[in-house]
Image (spheres, coloured by chain):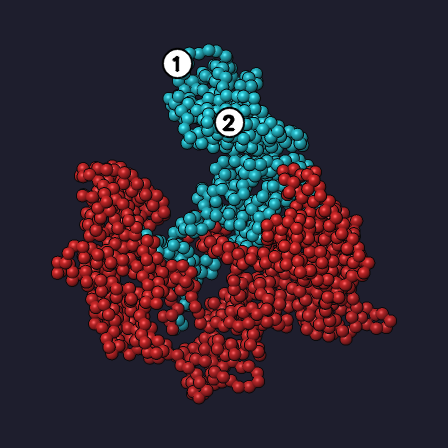
Chain colours: A red, B cyan
Amino acid sequence: MMGDEIKKRINSLNFALLSPDEIRKMSAVKVTTADTYDEDGFPLDRGLMDLHMGVIEPGLRCKTCNGKVDECPGHFGHIELAMPVIHVGFVKEIKDILDATCNSCGRIKMKDEELEVYRPILEKTILNGEETLESTSIVNRIIDEAAQRTVCPHCGAEQYKITLDKPTTFRENGRKLSAKEIRERFERIPDKDLIFLGINPNSARPEWMILTVLPVPPVNVRPTITLETGERSEDDLTHKLVDIIRINQRLRDSKDSGAPQLIIEDLWELLQYHITTYFDNQTSGLPPARHRSGRPLKTLVQRLKGKEGRFRSNLSGKRVNFSARTVISPEPFLSINEVGVPEEAARELTVPIPVTPFNIEKLREIVRRGPNPKGEKYLPGANYVIKQNEKGMRQRILIMEKNAEEIANKLEPGWIVERQLMDGDVVLFNRQPSLHRMSMMAHRVRVMKHRTFRFNLAVCPPYNADFDGDEMNLHVLQSEEAKAEARILMAVQEHIRSPRFGGPIIGGVHDHITGMFMLTYMNPKFTKEETLHILSYVKYDKLPDPVIENGKEYYRGKDIFSLILPKDLNIEYKSKICDGTGCKECVFEKCPYDAYVMIKEGRLITGTIDEKSIGAFKGILLDKISRDYPPDVAAQFIDNFTRLAVGVISFRGFTTGIDDTDIPEETKIQVDLILNDAIEATKTYIDAYQRGILQPSPGKSPEETLEDNIMRVLSDAQKKAGEIASKHLGLENPSVIMARSGARASMLNLSQVAANIGQQAVRGRRINRGYLGRTLPHFRKGDLGAYAHGYVRSSYKKGLTPLEYFFHAMGGREGLVDTAVRTSRSGYMQRRLINALEDLKVTDNDGIVIDTTDNIIQFKYGEDGIDPTRSKGGKPVDFDSIFQKVLGERYLSAKRGGK
Amino acid sequence: MLSFIWKDNEKKFREMIEKLPVKYGVDFNIPDEIKTPLRAYVTFDGSIIEYEVYIKEILPKDVKSDYNRTTKGVQAILVIERADKVNLNVKDIEPVGKKQGSKVQKFMLINIEEEAPKIPEKFRKLNKMEEKIHELLASMKKSLPDNIVEELSSRIIKFNLNDDEIRAVLEETVKDFEKSMVDPHEAVGIVAAQSIGEPGTQLTLRTFHYAGVAEVNITKGLPRLIEIVDARTKPSTPTMTIYLEDSIKNDQEKVEIIAKKIESIEMIDIADVEINVSEMTITIVLDREKMAKRRITKTQVMDALKRIKHQGLSINEEDDNIIISLEEPSYKRLYNLSEEVKNLLVSGIKGIERAIVKYEEAQKEYRIYTQGSNLKAVLEMDGVDPRKTTTNDIMEIYEVLGVEAARNAIIDESIRTLEEQGLNVDIRHIMLVADMMTFEGTVEAIGRHGVAGKKASVLARAAFEITSKHLLQAGLLGESDGLRGVAENIIVGQPITLGTGAVNLVYKYPEKKR
């Protein structure tokens, strides 16, 4: 146990090239047989599955370390190549070095005094590994310069032009340079010159870029897959290695038997091909090596690179245990800090609990229950216990119904019990795409019946979740440190405010807003029975004072709402239903539309609570509470208002339907008249245009002017028609309540249903595509009229004509395509941004922003050291609140008077 | 005798010598040894008039003064005391300049406004209330940023607070301010990247017409944001907003004239260029109507034609036709020449395809919006307010005005792009991205060719893009990965170095009781 707690940390990783000697030294076996298993399925000696290179079959032991399958880490083998071969990854570097060095003495073709000036800087950068990027430009300059020289300044030998035939053939003055020759040349380059070629002499020699020995990766890296049929199938790398060994053998034989040069050359080239594709099977200019089925082989480079490569899919992101995924659904009676977990998932997910003298009895009981406790009520059992045996080895014991009792009795301090999830455990909850940190937050578990994850609707906005089949992931934290961090830093209540804009991101949605609107708009009365019913979901101190009318006790909606407000809250603002029209001057709390919210000492005096009070993103009240009060108070407030809203809306009932948008006949006629006028207006414009008397607006052609005018006329008409229709849709209308309070939809949507849909557009213009000179064959060629270019005159309720329907679908399709393209593009942009900025952090004392190499990016974060999350919409302090606090009423009256 | 050749508009020069002494900026260094007075030789383009100029003083280029044009290239400022028209023997001329001995050294003439330097409002002095607030804060051993003090002071004055109330307000403000500070080791970079990336899905993909202004199409939404972050050399739709000097910004006619001057007009816009194969000549048929519309005179056309550098070129006028003939014509040369003539800039500024004048109701002034951008040339124009005039081409701003200006341009453009779409992103996030792109002194892209590709860690680079190249190169260079960043520590399976991972807690077990 002790040993686990002291964690070692890797300080640094060094990279270098493997020298042939080193390859041989680390090799466990020299592989010579181009085959894997014998007839009995036993690995061949000196074959590619030689037991010296590790074991993949249970029962066998590694001949190098004597370890079993899970114990042996695997060991490298090697292949001695008959002839040297170029490493494809270094072709460019080989070319550069050939260009820059003398073909006979191996020195860089520059005088020592020219070179030495760069030595100090290159030594600093390359040898000490600082700012390696700066050195590359110096090295490139040296190489460019040296390549120009036609005579070696050291030995006077004449130099020839080196060309590269992609991918791996070098020519000097047209003559082919064999890998062997290149290697010989590279051997002549003195160590002291290497630094000028961008090679660190401590970690690499240029000749090591030409392979003479090929390391064979351990079998664990390229395991044999046994199919259900008993058939064995080798890894792609093994296939490639078989090819290499086979050709290598033939090449060696031909060489030894003195075969003609031509044959040797051919075999040599074939070996080069196999080794090239072994490294990178997507080398340009080479046909990729293929599997028998025609599928290109996945060789070394392919294993590493790209989204599915080792780096991005196995190293930067890993699969984990103790996680669950299922469909989500809403549960208004959970706190925002909670998540409902299905019993079935809870039984699988466990938390490790160390046994101590203090909890041993409790844990015994849990273990005794076994993995599948019976009973109506969920009680956590345990799935495993972990004990330390004599050798200090950990042993995991599976708990089953039959051994539960026995294990429970044996339990002693020092053991660990893997207890099933229970209420109150801390878990991380996540929905993909995880676009910001609020996409993964810590919740407290509530184990529940049924098979979905459930949470409070107010938490939908940060996850961007809805319940049309979305699934989410859940991770159970395993260590005390992790749990503590999650509780303090990742809990939902710590993320009510978004760092993006310094406002609330968790808040009321849809029915919450409708419910609050119904509770507070025009302050409705509720009888005591109704009030108690509505409040039955909410925690509150005591009922407000009733109003007595005709001897009956009533409670006012605003008083009921006031119950859940913090008692010292003071704030005033305009609510969403205030549209600012129709009032000459704001009369503040005397607003006839009940649109001016005034809260004094935690009492809602006037105003309607709607989206601008409690909505996610926009809630001013929520903003104030989440900033000025501790997170648990804010969380409590959200819990309360969501329940209150649900209470109100389910008690009063709320429904919407197509008849919400019914408008009187004469209004329909009015709308028709407006639309007719608009159509006439477009006709006038078209007529003027066709007669060539349309006055073009500045900087535009007549065609564009015409388009602009038509678009304008039609959209004005739509607006006007909408306004007329809206006049008949008052705030007693459920659809209008939703639109005006900000719960869902907008007045535009309603007017489209009731009056007129309007112009459809593709790429921001009227629809202009289709046939030559017309959009559809139903129109005359050159028809510029509104109907011929995607104008939809009908309303949704009336229904669209086939032509209108078609144009509408065109507009709709564009939207879909747009979304699809946008997600991928913005995803990539975000990945790049994260990659560029991920290492930045604020220092512990001064708020300086630094990167990993201690470069200062900002002297003070954001120029003022303010955390946007805690800011008031970007402003460091909340002036209004401060002045109001100090001056009280005087501030408000002065502020109003000033306006 | 040391001399230099002075290239300028003659009329301006005459105006100048009436007002002597006058200060001028030149684009070369004056050697230190040369003592004043210095004699200089002056000439003009086209008409050669020779002057002797007596120089009273040479000021270094960083002398405090307010240039009304771009200061790029100014190396020294000459105080000219006297200028006499003389006829010198041309052989006496020994030009000085950047390169001593070059035959003709042109240099730019820059007027220095004599008026007191204008201090932007940002840098004004503290007013009394602000000073008082600072004093009070100092007595509380606290401090607040100037913009907060400014806001406080204006509110205190507006609501007429007494001293006790001021003190109470300050205490509350300091408390609120300190509550809002960032936590140490906060992963501000990731938060910034997420805050900009997350609303990316809500941005539009389309380019729209510029609100109200016809024809100036500009890229908006996601493509524009990507463009900014990519630090492209040219934006897909470069555009400028040209502000005008106070004296003319309300005069539509004058503004229209400037707009016409800015808009580049090529020969093809005002004339037909034809190749006459039988005569082996090029005929330019001027279109009077188009010329009048664009306010181009024939002289301008002829002047422009003079700029063509071609051997053995002769230009003849015949009414509205201009005939160009070559000494040794060949079809190929004729064709090349005709292409050159077609694209010849007759008037305007290169790169600016269109300039549109628009009246801004809110500010009550005319502005010019352009399609195409050439900041340097526009800033040098008369009547243009160089302090406000701007472009959406960030790299151009970087070249003309420097990195700090480029940084601000990145911030402004990003904020504008996001706000146009109704998205609210805190400016601090965008500032961080802009600072990351510019902290090295140049504008770097976010991505594999810029910031992300230059990370210190091999593993982090390999995990981003072009994996194999980075790994192989690391072997040759013998690179060492210090595992200080996020990506590399995740790869090796260790806690990252941000937030709670940046601190170590050491607990010393108390000595065991006997």
Using a 10 Å C-alpha cutoff, classify the residue at mark 1 as few (fewer than 14 neighbours), some (14 to 19) or many (20 or more): few
Q: Position of residue A84 (x, y in %)?
A: 21, 55
Disc 1 and disc 2 in contact, CB within 8 angstroms:
no
Q: Secondary structure at mark 1?
A: helix
Considering every residue shown, the one lying at the far front of the view is: B278
Residue A768's place in the image compared with B239, above or below, is below
Q: Residue at x 20, y 43 (%)?
A: A103
- The residue that label 1 is drawn on is B91
Left or right of A779 in this view: A346 = left
Using a 10 Å C-alpha cutoff, classify the residue at mark 2 as few (fewer than 14 neighbours), some (14 to 19) or many (20 or more): many
Considering every residue shown, the one lying at the far right of the view is: A550
Q: Secondary structure at mark 2?
A: strand
Instruction: Pinpoint the chain carrying mark 1.
Output: B
Question: What's the CA distance linking mark 1 and mark 2?
Answer: 41 Å
Q: Position of residue A102 (x, y in %)?
A: 21, 42
Q: Position of residue A382 (x, y in %)?
A: 47, 80
Q: Quadrant of the N terminus of chain B?
A: top left
Left or right of B122 in this view: A278 = left
Viewer-closest of A691 and A484:
A691
Viewer-closest of A155 and A345:
A155
- The residue that label 2 is drawn on is B283
Viewer-closest of B174 and A455:
A455
Q: Is residue A645 shown to the viewer in this render?
A: yes
Residue B335's place in the image compared with A766, above or below, is above
**Amino acid type assigned to the residue bearing label 2 in the image:** Thr
Residue A788's place in the image compared with A355, above or below, is above
**Amino acid type assigned to the residue bearing label 1 in the image:** Lys
Viewer-closest of B256 and B168:
B256
Q: Give the number of the mark in front: 1 or 2.
A: 2
Total labels: the figure holds 2
Q: Residue at x 71, y 59 (%)?
A: A795
Q: Is residue A746 shown to the viewer in this render?
A: no
